[in-house]
Image (spheres, rainbow, N blue to C red):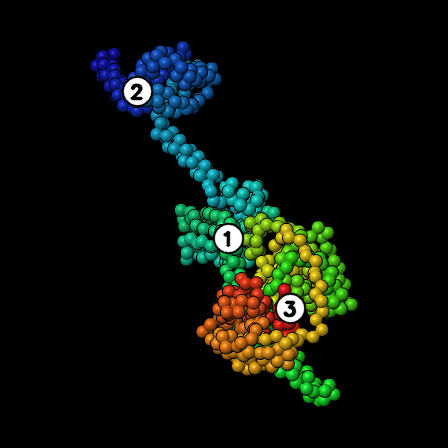
């Protein structure tokens, strides 16, 4: 018997279950829709129905946005035809803006297995997509920052392999990304910097330091060296183990080059200051030393005149005079290196100077050294003291000879050259047209330490007693005082080359005029002698009287003025020291000129060029004789001045 109550109760339970199921499906945030075979919605939960209605109106108003809808329709039809589930992502307009959905399309079958429709379950993945998009954009920004950074950046494995490299690092070291990733940082690090770099890395791996920075050198692909400032940090994994290093590399080659240039300039300054200090010392002692040598030379001459050559004293006095001459030469060398000697510049052609001393040069350096010339036919002229230029060439030739004890080749080359501002600055020379003198030997050469000190006074590599150490310093002083520059290029086993640059002048070389020979440097004129050093004054007075002159002797400017006033006769010449107490020689001459207008003037001094310029003598047209001088030199100079028109 059919129980109506049971059937009614069952239907009520089913109705409640259906209602509960609908409520459950309507409560889902996901969009649920069942389509029949005609792809018409047969069921939608609340979210799906609201979205469907809203989207249908949107597509009707904005047909250009229907691409995502058409794509979904195509997927639905494909699932109907194939019976295979499909997942599709797509952006679709939503009630609160464009949204991303992940839609799963599932085929529906009846009990017989026939496909009756499809079920779509769409989940809103907009936030996930936004996060993914943010990650993509962040990665893009990182890549742009990484690749376009103004400094080199690299990710380096703990074993030194390059994991990621930016373009700037490739530019710094000259390799492509592919070439660098096939290498380790050890491969491109200068050997002298590698151990320090590795020591820092070991400390970071051990956790004793968080980061490190150092200046180091990379080996460029072209074989050069690149200075960089390196900063390194360590990235660790979640468990704390090392993952990779981040290296930031800044190219500081330009700065290091500037620092090196500044260091060289500082070294040049210090060297110049040392030379200047010795020069001041030389100038300080020159006056007294030259006065004493003048006395020694003159008295030696007097003694030699009174002694026969066969007398044993003749040899002793000759040795004394020779020692005094060598001492005088030493003083002149000191003043030459310190650029304080008196120069008598004239327009000269270096080719003429070289040819003029060729015979003496060959005798000086010996037959085992072959001397060759490469002289420019169109060589310009320079303004220099020919005697000093000869000394430069002779000193460099002797230096070359000593560097070739077993013989060799000495080459002297001349040429024209024009220095631009940069070249002139590097050489401490004047920019513009110059004349080049090059002296090259194929001797043993010099190392960098010797080369750096080669122009220092008293520095020599010769055996004790074989050299004074003034030859090259004298060369440097003469060249510098002549307005030129000198540089040396040398290396062990490669010989030595000295290059001298002197400013070129447009003036032409004057023909040397031959003066008529004077039989005897003597006379009968009256000479006013002014010298504050009594011992020197006595010697000079004796020399002049012996030569036949009448001498009025004064110990200073005041005495000289008084003598000039009291002397009734003619005074033909005033011979005066330049630097004297109370009244300088120049000041005395100016006052005497008003009293004796026709009187000729000859200055003498043992001081250096700076002191003479300071006292106004160098600017005048009067004559000068440098102490120390011999009796013959002094009497000859006096006679020459008196004989001038």
Please name the residue that numbered disc 3 is placed on. 643
C-alpha distance separating marks 3 and 1: 60 Å
Q: Is residue 600 visible?
A: yes
- Residue at 39% across / 16% down in the picture? 65
Residue located 51% across and 67% down the image: 593
Q: Which mark is first along the chain, 3 or 2?
A: 2
- Secondary structure of residue under mark 1: helix
Give the left or right position of residue 632, taking residue 139 as reference: right
Say which mark, if any, is on residue 95.
2
Between 334 and 127, the residue placed more toward the observer is: 334
Q: Image quadrant of residue 76?
A: top left
Q: Find numbered disc 3 in the image and state the secondary structure of the residue it sits on.
A: helix
Position of the N terminus, as image quadrant, is top left
Mark carried by residue 32? none
Q: State the SS at label 2.
A: loop
Q: Residue furthest left?
A: 5
* Residue 258 numbered tag: 1
* Inter-mark Cα distance, 2 to 3: 122 Å
Q: Toward the viewer: 229 or 59? A: 229
Q: Residue at x 59, y 75 (%)?
A: 526
Q: Mark 1 or 2, which is nearer the eye?
A: 1
Q: Nearer the viewer, mark 2 or mark 3?
A: 3
Residue 10 position (above or below residue 302)? above
**Image location (x, y in percent) of residue 104:** 40, 23
Q: Quadrant of the C terminus?
A: bottom right
Residue 461 visible from this viewpoint: no
């Amino acid at each position: 018997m059919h129980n109506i109550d049971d059937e009614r109760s069952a239907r009520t339970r089913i109705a409640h279950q259906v209602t509960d199921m609908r409520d459950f499906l309507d409560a889902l945030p996901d969009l649920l829709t069942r389509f029949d075979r005609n792809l018409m919605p047969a069921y939608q939960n609340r979210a799906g129905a609201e979205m469907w209605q809203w989207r249908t109106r949107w597509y009707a108003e904005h047909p250009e946005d229907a691409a995502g809808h058409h794509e979904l329709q195509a997927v639905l039809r494909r699932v109907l035809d194939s019976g295979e589930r499909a997942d599709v992502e797509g952006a679709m307009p939503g009630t609160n803006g464009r949204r991303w959905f992940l839609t799963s399309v599932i085929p529906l079958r009846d009990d017989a297995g026939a496909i009756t429709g499809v079920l779509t379950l769409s989940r809103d993945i907009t936030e996930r997509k936004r996060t993914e998009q943010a990650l993509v954009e962040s990665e893009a920004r990182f890549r742009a920052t990484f690749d376009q950074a103004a400094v080199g950046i690299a990710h380096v494995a703990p074993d030194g392999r390059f994991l990621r490299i930016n373009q700037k690092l490739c530019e710094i070291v000259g390799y492509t990304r592919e070439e660098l990733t096939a290498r380790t940082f050890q491969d491109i690090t200068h050997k002298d910097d590698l151990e320090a770099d590795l020591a820092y890395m070991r400390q970071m791996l051990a956790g004793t330091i968080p980061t490190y920075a150092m200046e180091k050198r990379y080996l460029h692909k072209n074989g050069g060296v690149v200075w960089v400032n390196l900063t390194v940090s360590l990235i660790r994994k979640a468990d704390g183990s090392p993952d990779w290093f981040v290296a930031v590399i800044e190219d500081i080659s330009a700065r290091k080059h500037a620092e090196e240039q500044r260091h060289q300039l500082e070294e040049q300054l210090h060297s110049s200051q040392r030379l200047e200090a010795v020069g001041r010392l030389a100038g300080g002692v020159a006056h007294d030393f030259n006065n004493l040598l003048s006395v020694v030379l003159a008295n030696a001459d007097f003694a030699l005149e009174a002694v026969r050559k066969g007398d044993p004293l003749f040899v002793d006095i000759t040795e004394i005079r020779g020692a005094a001459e060598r001492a005088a030469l030493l003083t002149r060398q000191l003043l030459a290196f310190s650029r304080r000697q008196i120069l008598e510049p004239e327009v000269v052609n270096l080719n003429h100077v070289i040819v003029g001393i060729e015979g003496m040069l060959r005798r000086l350096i010996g037959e085992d050294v072959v001397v060759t010339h490469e002289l420019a036919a169109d060589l310009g002229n320079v303004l220099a003291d020919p005697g000093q230029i000869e000394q430069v060439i002779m000193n460099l030739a002797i230096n070359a000879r000593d560097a070739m004890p077993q013989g060799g080749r000495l080459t002297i080359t001349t040429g024209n050259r024009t220095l631009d501002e940069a070249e002139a600055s590097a050489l401490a020379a004047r920019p513009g047209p110059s004349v080049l003198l090059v002296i090259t030997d194929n001797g043993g050469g010099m190392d960098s330490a010797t080369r750096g000190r080669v122009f220092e006074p008293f520095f020599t590599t010769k055996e004790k007693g074989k050299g004074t150490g003034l030859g090259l310093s004298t060369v440097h002083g003469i060249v510098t005082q002549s307005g030129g520059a000198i540089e040396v290029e040398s290396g062990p086993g490669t010989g030595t080359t000295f290059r001298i640059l002197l400013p070129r002048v447009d003036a032409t070389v004057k023909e040397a005029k031959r003066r008529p020979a004077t039989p005897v440097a003597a006379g009968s004129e009256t000479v006013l002698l002014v010298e504050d050093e009594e011992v020197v004054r006595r010697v000079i007075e004796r020399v002049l009287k012996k030569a036949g002159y009448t001498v009025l002797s004064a110990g200073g400017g005041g005495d000289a003025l008084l003598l000039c006033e009291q002397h009734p006769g003619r005074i033909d010449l005033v011979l005066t020291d330049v630097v004297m107490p109370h009244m300088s020689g120049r000041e005395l001459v100016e006052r005497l000129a008003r009293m004796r207008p026709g009187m000729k003037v000859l200055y003498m001094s043992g001081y250096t060029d700076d002191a003479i310029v300071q006292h106004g003598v160098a600017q005048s047209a009067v004559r000068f004789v440098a102490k120390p001088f011999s009796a013959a030199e002094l009497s000859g100079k006096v006679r020459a001045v008196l004989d001038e028109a």
